[in-house]
Image (spheres, helix red, strand yellow):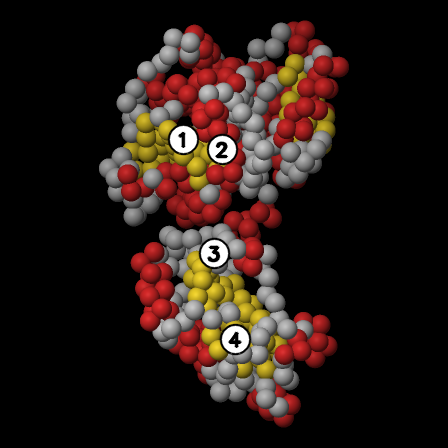
Amino acid sequence: MESDEAMPLLRRLRQEILFARQRVYRAGLPTPLEQLPLPDFNGEIWVKREDVSAIKAYKWRGAFNRMAVLTPEESAAGVVTASAGNHAQGVALAAGLLGVKADIFMPGTTPSVKQNAVKRLGGDQVTIHLVGDAYDESVQAAKDFASQSKGTIVHAYDDLHVMAGQGSLADEVIMSGKGPFDVAFLQIGGGGMASGVATWLKMFWPDIKLIGVEGVDQASMKAALAAGKPTRLDHIDIFCDGSAVRQAGDLPFEICREVLDDIITVTNREVSEAIRIMWDGLRAIPEPAGAMGLAGALQCKASLAGKRVLTVLCGANLDFNKLALIAESTGSAQQPRQFLRINIPEIPGAMLKLLDGVLAGVSINDFLYGKTDAQQAWPIFGLDCDATQLAEIQQRLNDGGYRWEDVSGSEDIEFRAIACNGPLLEHPVFLKLEFYERPGALHDFLSETIRGRANFCYFNYRYTGERIGRALIGLEFAAAAQRSAFLEWLPTSGKGYRSCQPLPDSVTARLI
């Protein structure tokens, strides 16, 4: 129920969303609403595709709506803003269309894809200032500049006209005829989009449940609601850089505490999995903040049976280099990759015994090992399996008397740290292997080519999505003559593998 204090602000926001209808479409076109195919979900999930908008994100709506109401004097003085990227593009688009000068302050860490887009959209109307490492530093620099230049601040989220512009995407949802929806999951950075969208949805569909979604380590709105006022976070994670805000906006806070039913948090891993699912279902690749809403819905999937769910793909301005990090965080199936470190004796055949036994038939998409002890080995395996399969593997390990630990998310995995004690290796050779990425191919190579001939001392492999898998394998031999005989015998190609080439001794010396 709306409080008396919030009523005037809510009424003004609703009114401004109506006015925004008359303005924002000078800058862009309505975006589609598409159903996301999700076979294991007993309900419907719909995605508002802001990634196909004029700036590949929703921020054009609020920026243009705010700048469209500048007075002639304000337009002449220009505008000033701070942004981690997408709001900057919205301001740049509006500046170019309206002929208004814009000084845009961005953190030095802003992805180049967003910086380049700002320059392209704004042209000569825009000046970019890279200041600081975080959004807050850019905000302060923008405020200082505006006080001297007399330019108008166009805030990224703490502005009624900006919030109303973002609310226009909810108006398109209402007008699409594809509603009503039972639940909406709305990502929150500063709260501008969530407040505008939630207000409009609630007005037309009073029974809809509105859930805010924040990153676990950037939950500024959740902290504000707990404290009863916006409060500054000491530390924020910037994996979801588009929503990395230390403190929720004052106006969005007032709205969100009235209209949201709940706020949940999601991990970077859950966001990465949501990105993968977007790609599988829609062939869309959101930036991390753009997938947070879906990540929230997937987290609550068990409680959404039979429900019609709305999410917003709010942006797709992803730094291409970040794709590798995202892919590493997910599995190739419906479950994130799990990493187990398993203890085996450092004796010939122990590794293959483990692969043939406990891990037989398991999809291994990551394999890290380096010899560090003369008696014991601790290889790490990345497994793509669901919770039931993982429990079965863990039970087999226990039944087999293996010592093991779950190292998912550890620094070993994050930085791919593979230690190897060179002085322990006897007559080593390293092989560069290319094998066919199909079930059993790597096992066939190891079983038929290596078994009984050498002992593993190093292994570095991870699945990359290619049809050909690549691995760097270290072997050691009891005597130099055995090493030489193996190298003379080793076929360059064979069953399950396309190429196997020994590295030169000079390279082997550098590796150990």
Amino acid tagged 4 = Gln
Q: Which mark is residue 376?
A: 4
Q: Which mark is on residue 219?
A: 2
Whether label 4 touches label 2, CB < 8 Å: no
In the rendered image, residue 442, in percent from the top left (x then y), is placed at 47, 73
Of helix, strand and loop, which one carries label 2? Answer: loop
Q: Which mark is residue 214?
A: none
The quadrant holding residue 185 is: top left
Secondary structure, mark 1, is strand
Instruction: Tell me which residue sits at (46%, 43%) in the image.
Output: 267
Q: Where residue 470 sits: x, y (%)?
A: 55, 68
Kind of residue indicated by mark 3 = Ser
Is residue 1 something one can see in this rendering?
yes
**Distance Cα–Cα, label 1 vs label 2:** 9 Å
Quarter of image, res 278: top left
- Label drawn at residue 408: 3
